[in-house]
Image (cartoon, grey):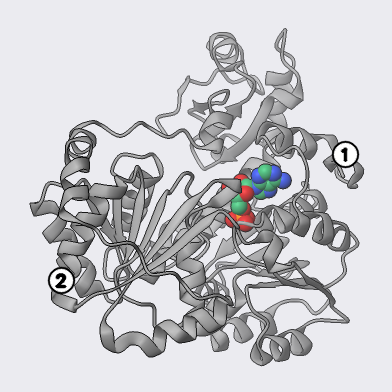
Amino acid sequence: MHFNELKVEEKILRAIEQLGYTEPTEVQEKVIPVALDKQDVLVKSKTGSGKTASFAIPLCELVDWEENKPQALVLTPTRELAVQVQEDITNIGRFKRIKGLALYGKSPFSKQKLALKQKTHIIVGTPGRVLDHIEKGTLDVSKIEYLVIDEADEMLNMGFLQQVESIVKLLPKNRTTMLFSATLSDQIKKLSSKYMKQAVSIEIDSAEENAPNIEHVKYVVMEELKLSLLEKLTIIENPDSCIIFCRTKERVDQLVDSLDEKGYTADKIHGGMMQEDRFEVMDEFRKGEFRYLIATDVAARGIDIEDITHVVHYDVPLEQESYVHRTGRTGRAGRSGKSIMFATPHEDKFVREIEAFIGFSIPTGIDLSADKVAQNRAAFNAKMKEQPEAKVSKSEQLNANITKLYFNGGKKKKLRAVDFVGTIAKIDGMTADDIGIITIQDNVTYVEILNGKGSLVLKTMRNTTIKGKLLKVHIAHK
Ligand code: AMP
């Protein structure tokens, strides 16, 4: 099947093509037509299957560009995932100029409130902050026609059920609801039957979407010997990019300090950190600026980082599902990966539960002899010293052709998006399709110019008026 066969407009097909997606994944093939038909849908599928695009494509297609109030709401369990989904929506909706906005906690409310005064088509947020905005009247949900609950099982694990239900009750009844979950527990089924209408149920066969090219191994190790085992393993494996999961934030802090001392390029992420720091660390890891990310399970869900070669479960996950989610950070998009679990002798019970859950027993890793460590040490030391190769993300590739321009006039000068489009599209060599997202604030406006035509527009707009006004224009700083 090809994306062309789906009933989506050319502007969206073009964005999909530029993202490098050649054919729909299984979940996309099954979900997109149903969603475009505005039927409720309950989807059992994991991250890594392309499920974000399976709702982002229909949402971008279905929302009406003219409407200023938000028409779609996507709820996610973590802030990192909210930002990632919002970015995916922006990438897919770029040529239709779809505006997505991420709302999440531990970040200034007032800034979000201001952003909500702008035209926004799709809101992506974590339940607490979304509910807060609705209750304070800063998020108008009267025009919400589409609701997506992403990673629903994780949402319940994190104790967000009540907040999710409170939000759903405040939304218009006449809407399309899509619920995505890695597992379909009774609680999830109950939630869906309570809030969805004759939902079409879609299950993506996990055998097919589960990356078969992940190698699993386990080591039984005493707690006090974990660090030296990790050291030996990393010397032998010499990973390019590795996530090490620990059970608590204290253990993350300790381990990152120990690895720092040993000269590893390591950083950490856990729920006790400031949100800005969390984003920054994820961003740097995504770009490949350091090789070892030490994390609690906040980083286990949904986070899509290319080319993670190794996942280490430094502590056995207490829930079987976490094993699958942690492991799913590697071996993405058909690549191979390795999952290595450390278990102390008395954690046998948890290991057996995990093995029963995944349906196979995890082989015990081979002995890491001193000889083998010695043989690999030189290569390991060499890699420790070299700067990791920078990774370029898909959205960066897409953004390479985009220039954001700043104009020193906005709402107070009675300027509207049509005024900018009208003037800029008339420039020789430009069409309306070369114009991306326009953000109009009280005194400034940002206009994205696509297809590498930024400098042409910049040059021309320096001496061209908009609605009779000559505005200052320069490349926006961010
Ligand atoms: P998700 O399951 O939404 O986290 O997506 C997993 C990864 O697959 C992301 O990096 C997507 O950009 C990528 N992806 C989504 N759809 C496709 C597709 N049709 N072809 C290739 N890659 C895709």
SS type, badge 1: helix
- Quarter of the image with the C terminus is top left
Task: Tell which of 190 and 336 is nearer to you.
Answer: 336
Q: Which is more toward the observer, 321 or 439?
A: 321
Does the closest atom of ligand 1 sit within 8 Å of the Cβ of label 1?
no
Dividing the picture into quarters, in which one does residue 434 lie? top right
Residue 314's place in the image compared with 352, above or below, is: above
Answer whether residue 158 is visible to the viewer in this image. Answer: no
Q: Residue at x 43, y 69 (%)?
A: 363
Residue 56 on image: x %, y %: 70, 54
Specify few, some or many for label 1: CA neighbours under 10 Å numbering under 14, 14-19, or 20 or more: few
Circle number at residue 306 = none
Numbered marks: total: 2
Along the viewing direction, whichever of 315 and 108 lies nearer the viewer: 315
Report which quarter residue 145 is drawn in.
bottom right
> Secondary structure under badge 2?
helix
Q: Amino acid at mark 2?
A: Leu
Mark 2 lies on residue: 225
Q: Which mark is residue 4?
A: 1
Name above or below for residue 471 compared with residue 447. Answer: above
Residue 164: horizontal and vertical position, in percent?
Answer: 59, 81
Report x, y in % for residue 360.
Answer: 55, 75
Amino acid type, residue under disc 1 in the picture: Asn
Where residue 339 sits, quadrant-wise, is: bottom left
Image quarter (top left, top right, bottom left or bottom right) of the N terminus: top right
411 lies above or below 316 = above
Closest to the observer, 64 or 473? 64
- Per the model, the C-alpha gap separating discs 2 and 1 is 55 Å
Measuring 68% from the left and 92% from the top, which residue is drawn there? 186
138 horizontally vs 188: left or right: left
Mark toward the start of the polypeptide (2 vs 1): 1
Residue at horizontal 73 percent and vertical 56 percent from the top: 54
